[in-house]
Amino acid sequence: MEVRERRRLMNYLNIPQLKLKYNIKQTSHLEPKAVIILLVSKLKGKEYEILEQSDDNLIFYNNPWALRWNFQRAILLDGGSVRIENSNNSSVISFSYYLDMLPLALLPFLLIISTVIDREYEAALFFGCFYIVLSIISIIRAKLEAKKILREILNNDDTNQTDYPE
């Protein structure tokens, strides 16, 4: 409930969101329900909140504004969804996730504004380049994290389908 209330408040206040959305599709021989159960256990272990869950659909969220230790924040996805469709003898897993760039953009943006006001244009250029590099690194890390989550789930070929963590 708390997450949904925050989302409604952000929509009501028209707070801008700089979300970059990505999608990964993979196939698996595991049943959709088994994949969802494995994903839920994996995501809960990484401090994600599960908003909605069914046998073939999952929506998760992580607060991008939460304080974290060290660089833990940079390797988390901000939220997303998983849809699983059956086709013949396999399941197609569509893993959609997003990365909110607004928390990452605030500090460099404020530094650029302050340096432009002081007419230090070289410093503004430096902070602009710094933000671009920081954004690229965080995008690459988010893509790697999403692929890692899927790879860890789908590499459970030797597990019994009735013995999944809950």
Image (spheres, grey):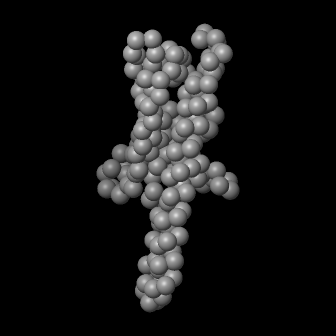
Q: Residue at x 33, y 50 (%)?
A: 11
**For residue 110, above or below residue 121:** above
Q: Position of residue 68 (x, y in %)?
A: 63, 53
Residue 66 visible here? no
Hey, which residue is sitting farthest bottom in the picture? 119
Q: Residue at x 52, y 45 (%)?
A: 143
**For residue 42, above or below residue 131:** above
Residue 160 visible here? yes
Number of labelled discs? 0
Q: Residue at x 51, y 16 (%)?
A: 29
Q: Position of residue 32 (x, y in %)?
A: 47, 18
The image quadrant where one finds the C terminus is: top right
The quadrant in which residue 1 appears is: top left
Quick one: 100 or 136, which is closer to the camera?
A: 136
Hey, which residue is sitting farthest right in the picture? 70
Q: Position of residue 12 (x, y in %)?
A: 31, 51
**For residue 91, above or below residue 70:** above
